[in-house]
Image (tube, rainbow, N blue to C red):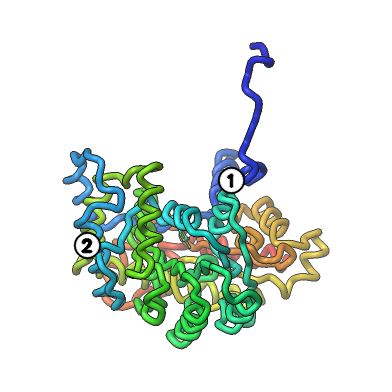
Amino acid sequence: MNNNNIPDVNLNLNVRGLPQSATLFINEKSNELKKQGKSVYKLGLGQSPFPVPQPVVDELKVNAHQKDYLPVKGLPQLREAVADYHCKNHGICYSPEGVIIGPGSKELMFMLQYVYYGDLIIPTPSWVSYAPQAQIIGRHVRWLHTSRKNNWRLTAEDLDAHCNDDPHRPRIVILNYPSNPVGVTYSVEELKSIAMVAQEHKIILLSDEIYGELHHQGKHVSIAKFYNEGTIISSGISKWCGAGGWRLGTFIFPESLMWLLNSMAVMASETFTSTSAPIQYAAIRAFKRGEYIENYLWRTRWILSKLGNKIAKMLNENDIYTPKPEGAFYLLADFYKYKKRLKTKGITDSKSLCAKLLDETGVAILPGKDFGMPPEELTARLAYVDFDGVKALSAAELVNSIDQIDDEFLDYYCGNILKAINLIIDWIKG
Ligand SMILES: Cc1ncc(COP(=O)(O)O)c(C=O)c1O
């Protein structure tokens, strides 16, 4: 082959040097080690371990023949089911006209950032993809750092102080709760205070509630209740319904922000056209809920709550600080008490901490740096999902109270994760 005839590399400046999404990278690296015959504990990728509820799978089968392009904003019956779901379950009664369906909420977030003209404010730590999306588009990102003493949650005071610097600047603030990567959420009082500040500064709140249904006590409250006119709720079926690979996400807008939805719909019409038709038909069943899905949800919450709390206890008892989990399937561990000891091993930041841990123990966790935390902070996210969710769920269906998800249950069905936690503890102390 004559090398003079192949095209030159010419990449958009915004994506030049941008690495692959951190969570996907750790997954590939773990698979590579597994292929080499090493034991790997995958606490990196945040994917639901549970199966898609059977009635939703059945609905997908029945709708496999659906082949037509659907309306850009989504199948009308699904938009209605989504609006209805938010109204019945969270008391947020926006019109079905305010719903847009996309191939994952991630894609909808990208479009929102693209069509909106203003700054993006991201409290740290935060999910790995918000900032790279802004970078791809060429948007300005402002980080709002939070602190361990507040379990890494945004405070109304910090938001207010940030906005007072330039009160009239157009801004979107992303608020994610229960949170990835910390696994904590906000109280009603905290949500009210943040909502008041947002309202005062006319901020657009993108309320990322993808883990809302995985509030361990089933008590998720949306901030939209307190700032209806400026809040967009982001959700979908990836987490609570175990259907990440189905790729379906939802945004719901209040009347006052329809200009954003309409603009996103134009962009969707020129890019992905519409979300997969069979998946949209099946998702109607998911959002309609009913007894089967409620039972499924409670069992998944019980398992996650018991497992998360057990891990947090093990870590805290060994001086690895972790907030008590309240939702989703993540824990943020802070190894700051081991700073000196880690330094003797040549570890001075979260990246080298996770790289060495993976090399020496086979436990894959993600560095706090990937979530926007200062690199020198010795923090890492653990996703406690490396277990057989089908088996654990079937067993949990036979119990009728959370108390029956005891240590014996966790050892039997989630033993691999507990082993990984012990490996982390032994390694850090060794
Ligand atoms: C906080 C958060 N938001 C959004 C998403 C995107 O979800 P999806 O695109 O599958 O709807 C994820 C996925 O990991 C997430 O953790």
| Residue holding disc 1 | 20
* Of the pair 194 and 257, the residue shown nearer to us: 257
Q: Is residue 34 left or right of residue 251?
A: right
Nearer to me, 42 or 6: 6
- The residue under label 2 is 80
| Residue depicted at 45% across the width and 57% down the height | 112
In this view, which residue lies farthest toward the bottom? 189
* Relative to 325, residue 52 above or below: above
Crowding at mark 2 (Cα within 10 Å: few <14, some 14-19, many 20+): some
In this rendering, would 106 be left or right of 134? Answer: left
Q: Amino acid at mark 1?
A: Gln
Residue at 20% over, 41% down: 66
Marks 1 and 2 sit apart, C-alpha to C-alpha, by 36 Å
Give the label, 1 or 2, closer to the camera. 2
Q: Is residue 198 above or below residue 67?
A: below
Confirm whether residue 206 shows in the render: yes
Image x and y of residue 352, in percent: 72, 56
Of 262 and 185, which appears nearest the observer?
262
Pointer 1 or 2: first along the chain: 1
